[in-house]
Every structure is written in C-alpha cells, then in structure tokens.
Amino acid sequence: MERITVNPQVHFGKPCITGTRITVQHVLQVLNDGLSFDQIIADYYPDLSKDDIRACLQYAIALVSAEDIHISSVAA
C-alpha cells in the first residue's frame, strides 16, 4: 500500500497515488467506464504505471473487506 497516500492537505484527505494528486476514486471511475490500464495511462495519466492502477484496486478491495455489511430486509 505504499503506492497510496492519504494526506489531509491533498484533495481533502482522499486517497491518492503517492507523489501525485490523482485520486484512487478517479482511477476506479475510469476503470468502471471500461478503460483499460493502457488507455488510462495513454489518455489520462502518462506518469502512472500499471502497478499504480493495481494499487488502487487493492486499496478498494482492502476497504470493502474491512467493512461489516448489514443487510436488513424491508417488509412490503
């Protein structure tokens, strides 16, 4: 996780790729839009590596795995 940094003075403390102002959220959004790692690097962030993008995915996985999810059923 050394590729992801949380600094309260950068993007209001949102997690960013270390040494950049690129948020994990934005990388995940463009992945969700269907862009490949190569497209993200070529079209948006030429200074990123594929390992940086993988770190964003790993960060998101770590957050989800740490959550306690409680599902409640709603009566109709």
Image (cartoon, helix red, strand yellow):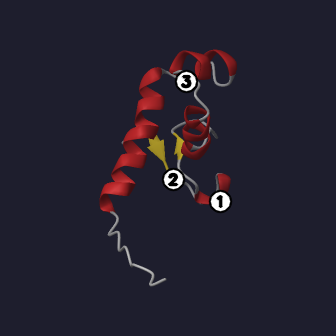
How far from the left and from the top, in percent, is residue 16? 55, 44
* Residue 17 horizontal side relative to residue 12, left or right: left
Q: Residue at x 65, y 59 (%)?
A: 12
How far from the left and from the top, in percent, is residue 50? 46, 22
Mark 1, residue position: 12
Q: Residue at x 60, y 40 (%)?
A: 29
Badge 3 or badge 1: first in the primary sequence = 1
How far from the left and from the top, in percent, is residue 10? 64, 52
Residue 48 is marked as: 3
Residue 60 is marked as: none
Could you tell me how far apart the alpha carbons at marks 3 and 1 are, in whole angstroms? 21 Å
Establish if 58 lies above or below 41: below
Q: Residues within 10 Å of mark 1 (few under 14, many from 20)?
A: few
Q: Residue at x 68, y 19 (%)?
A: 43
Labels 2 & 3 near each other (Cβ < 8 A): no
* Residue 26 horizontal side relative to residue 4, left or right: right
Residue 2 in sight? no
Circle 2: residue type: Val
SS of the residue under disc 3: loop
Residue 6 is marked as: 2
Residue 57 in sight? yes
Closest to the observer, 53 or 6:
53
